[in-house]
Amino acid sequence: VSKGVQNVLDYLQNEYPDMDVIGISGNFCSDKKPAAVNWIEGRGKSVVCEAIITEEVVKKVLKTEVSALVELNMLKNLTGSAMAGALGGFNAHASNIVSAVFIATGQDPAQNIESSHCITMMEAVNDGKDLHISV
């Protein structure tokens, strides 16, 4: 789009030599910036991931209880983020994972700002024994 706009501006500059071009972007795209428009309309790809982690894994590997994780997620990721005025960043640092993928695949890691727009949800399932987590 930027190259197309530049071509149009070049054409117009030839037709109207006294025209001043001050920029080719109004910055509404909010490229590499935490903006509400990106949270509302999305930017790039949208992904939903979910898993059920068994009670045994929560206890053995994570060394905690399902109910404790559910409560922590609500207090930290949801309530804490809301109190901080987060723009859709109600998560446990999802942008770190996306940044690692970007770096590993040669992408621009500065584009990771949009991956901060993520909600981490947790709930107890199977009579409160297992953990359902989704982002």
Image (cartoon, grey):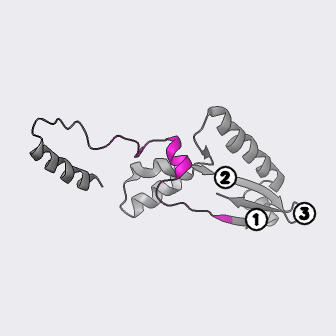
> What amino acid is at disc 1?
Val
> Within the image, what quadrant is residue 131 found in?
bottom right
Q: What residue does disc 2 label?
A: 120
Up the image or down, 114 lies above or below 36; here it is below
Side of 40 where 75 appears, left or right? right
> What amino acid is at disc 3?
Asp
Side of 87 where 82 appears, left or right? right
Numbered disc in front, either 3 or 1: 3
Q: Residue at x 9, y 46 (%)?
A: 14
Which element carries disc 1, helix, strand or loop?
Answer: helix
Which element carries disc 3, helix, strand or loop?
Answer: loop
Q: Give the numbered dot on residue 116.
A: none
- Chain-order first, disc 1 or disc 2: 1
Up the image or down, 33 lies above or below 45; here it is above
Q: Residue at x 87, y 60 (%)?
A: 128
Q: Give the numbered dot on residue 127.
A: 3
Mark 3 → mark 1, Cα distance in angstroms:
16 Å
Numbered disc in front, either 1 or 2: 2
Span highlighted in magenta in the image: 25-50
> Which part of the image, by quadrant, shows the N terminus?
bottom left
Which element carries disc 2, helix, strand or loop?
Answer: loop
Q: Give the numbered dot on residue 57.
A: 1
Residue in the foreground of this view, choosing between 135 and 9: 9
In the rendered image, residue 18, in percent from the top left (x then y), is placed at: 11, 35
Mark 1 → mark 2, Cα distance in angstroms:
19 Å
> Which part of the image, by quadrant, shows the C terminus?
bottom right
In the rendered image, residue 47, in percent from the top left (x then y), is placed at: 57, 62
Report the magenta stretch's main SS.
loop
- Chain-order first, disc 3 or disc 1: 1
Numbered circles on residues, count: 3
> What amino acid is at disc 2?
Thr
